[in-house]
Amino acid sequence: MRLVLASQSPARLSVLRSAGLDPAVVVSGVDEDAVAAALTDPAPAELVTALAKAKANAVVEMVSEPDAVIVACDSMLSIGGEMVGKPATAEIAKQRWAKMAGGSGVLLTGHAVVRLDGGQRTKEASGTRSTTVHFANPSQAEIDAYVATGEPLQVAGAFTLDALGGWFVEGVEGDPSSVIGISLPLLRQLLAEVGVSVTEMWN
């Protein structure tokens, strides 16, 4: 049973590798804005789960292995009543940090798992993990320096926990791996729902 990660996120791949898995990586190419626009006033968990499912469904069509389990995720930050993904520009990243600094937000990561047997889709499961993130209060110079690295532009909520952004996170309440982009506890549960034991997939 081949594990396929439907994500170009190096952080998600690193989490899985550190946890004993060696997934193939297939990028979905899904238009996330189009998927979100097709939903009518979705709840935050519904939005990130729908995006994860769209990525998994797209990658199902690209996988050549007959027996595989596809894992897709999507993360967004809920801050001040607004759901935000990756900032498109440095200016937006700075605006996000002006709002986040000294406060808290909820990082939601939707997960979708699809199992293929003999090239046929046999089982699927999905779920969302929500984790509260408490942000430090960096100076404007620190925010400008962080944004200048380009890292915040590539990640949901304009911050990371496991890289440069970790300097500006005071703590988390909940699942740290979910904040990095893929929840190991939730993924273990979803894999079990489709009949896959995570321990049997360890290297």
Image (cartoon, rainbow, N blue to C red):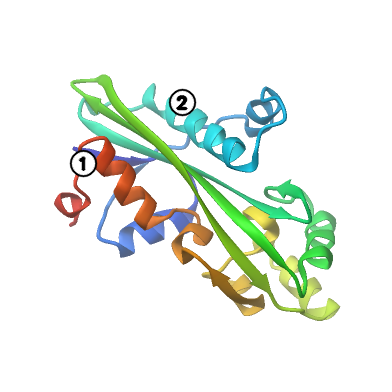
Give the amino acid at mark 1. Answer: Val
Position of 148 with respect to 17 (left or right) is: right
Q: Is residue 139 above or below residue 70?
A: below
| View extreme (left): residue | 200
Q: Earlier in the sequence, mark 1 or mark 2?
A: 2
Position of 194 with respect to 9 (left or right) is: left
Give the amino acid at mark 2. Answer: Ala
Q: Position of residue 64 (x, y in %)?
A: 28, 26
Quadrant, the C terminus:
bottom left
Look at mark 2 in the image and give the residue it sits on.
58
Report crowding for label 2: few under 14, some 14 to 19, many 20 or more residues within 10 A (C-alpha): some
The residue tagged with tag 2: helix, strand or loop? helix
Position of 29 with respect to 115 (left or right) is: right
Look at mark 1 in the image and give the residue it sits on.
196
Q: Residue at x 63, y 33 (%)?
A: 32
Q: Residue at x 19, y 47 (%)?
A: 197
